[in-house]
Image (cartoon, rainbow, N blue to C red):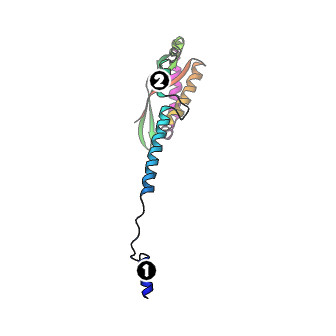
């Protein structure tokens, strides 16, 4: 028995666990920070991503081509009564039409037809469709197409919605 006690004493029989080294953790954190900083620098300076440095891109913006001439024809505000879950609500719509300057007068002459087609379309739209987050994009495309049909191809380039409120 004495031999067993001696063997236990030489093997470190005092049951205290050894402390683990924190060196791998510290090295991991340092490598992570160094890699992240290097990646940020490489991306920001244009080494990665195939882009040019920020200073060179700034010069290109200054040399942009001039805009082509454009005119805007404002539409009269449209207010439409809609029923929303048993309560009365109103849709207030205001927009402008983007046209070429030489077509502005032609589009202005067709304004009663444009307002008629917009009123008719907006009254047919259900309130559930209006309240969707992506509704404005699809409604805008539908209204623009109807306006282009009324005015004829090439007169109206775009419909710019300036107010679209349901209250």
Assess whether residue 157 is covered by the magenta stretch: no
What percent of the width, then of the height, locates residue 136?
Answer: 50, 33
**Residue 145 % position (x, y):** 58, 26
In this orientation, does residue 157 appear? yes
Q: Residues within 10 Å of mark 2 (few under 14, many from 20)?
A: few
Q: Quadrant of the N terminus?
A: bottom left
Secondary structure, magenta segment, majority class: helix
The image quadrant where one finds the C terminus is top left
* Secondary element type, mark 2: helix
Q: Is residue 70 above or below residue 135?
A: above
Front-most of 80 and 104?
104
Please give the range of residues in magenta.
109-134
Camera-nearest residue between 156 and 16: 16
Question: SS of the residue at dot 1?
Answer: helix
Residue 157, by quadrant, is top right
Location of mark 1 (residue): 8
Total label count? 2
The span from disc 2 to disc 1 (Cα, nearest Å) is 75 Å
Decide which of tag 2 and tag 1 comes sooner along the chain. 1
Instruction: Tell me if residue 13 comes above or below residue 127 in the rendering.
Output: below
**Percent coordinates x, y for residue 119 in the rendering:** 50, 28
Which residue is painted at 52% across and 33% down in the image? Answer: 47
The residue pinned by badge 2 equals 58
């Amino acid at each position: 028995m004495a031999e067993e006690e001696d063997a236990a004493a030489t093997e470190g029989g005092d049951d205290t666990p050894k402390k683990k080294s924190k060196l791998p953790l510290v090295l991991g954190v340092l490598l992570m920070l160094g890699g992240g900083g290097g990646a940020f620098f490489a991306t920001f300076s244009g080494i990665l991503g195939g882009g040019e440095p920020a200073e060179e891109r700034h010069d290109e913006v200054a040399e942009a081509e001039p805009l082509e001439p454009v005119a805007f024809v404002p539409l009269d505000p449209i207010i439409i009564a809609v029923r929303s879950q048993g309560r009365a609500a109103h849709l207030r719509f205001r927009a402008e039409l983007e046209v070429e300057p030489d077509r502005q007068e032609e589009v202005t002459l067709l304004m009663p037809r444009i307002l008629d087609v917009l009123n008719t379309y907006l009254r047919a739209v259900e309130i559930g469709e209006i309240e969707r987050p992506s509704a404005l994009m699809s409604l805008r495309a539908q209204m623009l197409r109807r306006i282009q049909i009324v005015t004829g191809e090439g007169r109206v380039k775009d419909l710019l919605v300036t107010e679209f409120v349901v209250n």
